[in-house]
Image (tube, coloured by chain):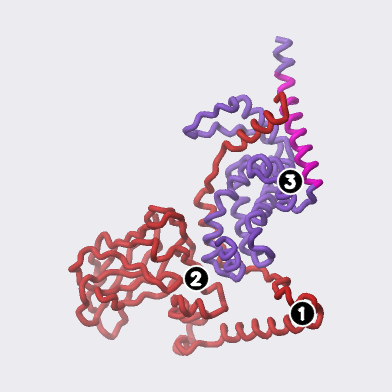
Amino acid sequence: MQAGLVERAQRGDQEAFAALATASADRCYALAYRILRDMHLAQDATQQALLSAWRDLPTLRDPERFEAWLYRLVVRACYAEATRDRRWGARVRLIPPDNSAVPDTSSSIADRDELERGFRRLTPEQRAVLVLHHYVGYPLTEIAETLGIPVGTARSRLHYATRQLRAAIEADARPTSSKERTA
Amino acid sequence: MTSGSSFDDRLQDWLEDGPTDAPHQVLDTVFAAVPSIPQRRAAWRLPSTISPMLGFARVLAGIAITVGLGSALFLFLRPTPGGVGDQGSPSPAAVAPPSAVASGAATASTPAPSALVLVVPCDNATLAARITLWEGAAGHRIAHVELTNTGSSACVVRATLRPQLVDGKRSVLIDGAAPAGSDPLLTLAPGKTLKTLVQDGNYCGPTPVAPVSIAFVLGDGSHVLAAPVSATDATVPPCLGSGSKADIEMQPWAP
């Protein structure tokens, strides 16, 4: 069904595109937010990706690959937003805990803060590969296709991103420990 | 952070936190912008069977496409018979006759130009409209109308549609104008309702069959008929003079 809508949208059918965009917007926004860690930037990136999708849809060769192709546009839009945002990397603003009804038993708030700070030190490319793997659930081949990079590059990028995130978290924890020792 | 898998689990849990629903402004902005954004042409969009023929066939195909586009452009830009009397005014009639735009059959059989097709993803099977109130105004009547998405998924609807005053036999008493193709699209979530005011005036035709109501023409040519205020309501706007045209127009849908 989605392939049919994609083909119609490729021929300029705005109604079909509206249906595709409506079905995809939430997933695009969720992906963008997790890469950018900022709701406003994620909103802009999602809008930009959907508009690019409309403009470039006729160039998509395989309608069955629409979702991966759209995710690629989202990731690119996130890169652009990160480049535009001069505060990127320097800003460490903690996101308040989600007010979901289900209590988070898997990690403490301190854990999440650690991850938040560590994640914000990563480059957009590193963030994207981590999010695609751990949030979207893509295997390496899919990540490679989405990002337009070889599988080997995706593998090493995921490896180094994970290592960098762990290192950032450990580096973040170190001053606190030394303070505690001196106190 | 002792083992790789526990770190991965922590990371995964942490990534699960956060918003999963896009703000409605995202789609509103996109839908408002799409009609004004031309799509890129894909050079590869030739049948794969001719690709081995390479050069010559591709040149021929290119010429055929160019001639086709030129013909379409010529047909698109030439004056329409209905627009003859409007030659002096810069009206939208130069773009397309409203009836052709609003007709689903016409848009389905006419390959170009896609920008003129009304974008109304919601269909009449999943939309329910009702008139909640008729108000009188100077020479006019104003209907308060609600439109609800009764389907199970969100859909989009143009901010303005072509309204019609219809009677109990579904005869069109007053026919409204088709809206501009550049009107924004509104997302209508399941169970959500949009409201509008529809004003009509100067009906000088025969006495209508009850109940009188309002219909909205969707982009595919189908209609959404609003439930009337009552089954016996046959009131129409007063005739102000048969020399003047009857009119009906709507305000944009709004939450």
Give the number of callouts: 3
The alpha-carbon separation of the residues under discs 2 and 1 comes to 35 Å
Q: What residue type is labelled 2?
A: Gly
Dividing the picture into quadrants, the one containing residue B146 is bottom left
Question: Is A135 on the left-hand or right-hand side of B60?
Answer: left
Residue position for label 2: B181
Crowd class of label 1 (few under 14; some 14 to 19; many from 20; radius 10 Å): some
For image coordinates 50% across by 87% down, the residue present is B80
Which residue is more in the foreground, B53 or B230? B53
The chain letter for the residue carrying disc 1 is: B
Q: Does the magenta stretch include residue B8?
A: no
Q: Is residue A166 magenta?
A: yes
Q: Colour of chain B?
A: red
Q: Nearer the viewer, mark 2 or mark 1?
A: 1
For image coordinates 54% across by 65% down, the residue present is A16
The secondary structure type at the circle numbered 1 is helix
The secondary structure type at the circle numbered 3 is helix
Q: Give the range drawn in magenta.
A: A152-176
The alpha-carbon separation of the residues under discs 3 and 2 comes to 43 Å
Which chain is painted in purple? A
Check if mark 3's residue and mark 1's residue have beta carbons within 8 Å. Answer: no
The chain letter for the residue carrying disc 3 is: A
Question: Is B101 on the left-hand or right-hand side of A129?
Answer: left
Check if mark 3's residue and mark 2's residue have beta carbons within 8 Å. Answer: no
> Measured from the top left, where is residue A80 in percent x and y?
70, 50
The secondary structure type at the circle numbered 2 is loop
Question: Which residue, as the protein is rendered here, is positioned at the far front?
Answer: B49
Q: Is residue B200 above or below residue A111?
A: below
Q: Which of marks 2 and 1 is nearer the N terminus?
A: 1
Q: Could you confirm whether marks 3 and 1 are on the same chain?
A: no
> Measured from the top left, where is residue A46 in percent x and y?
60, 51
Residue position for label 1: B58
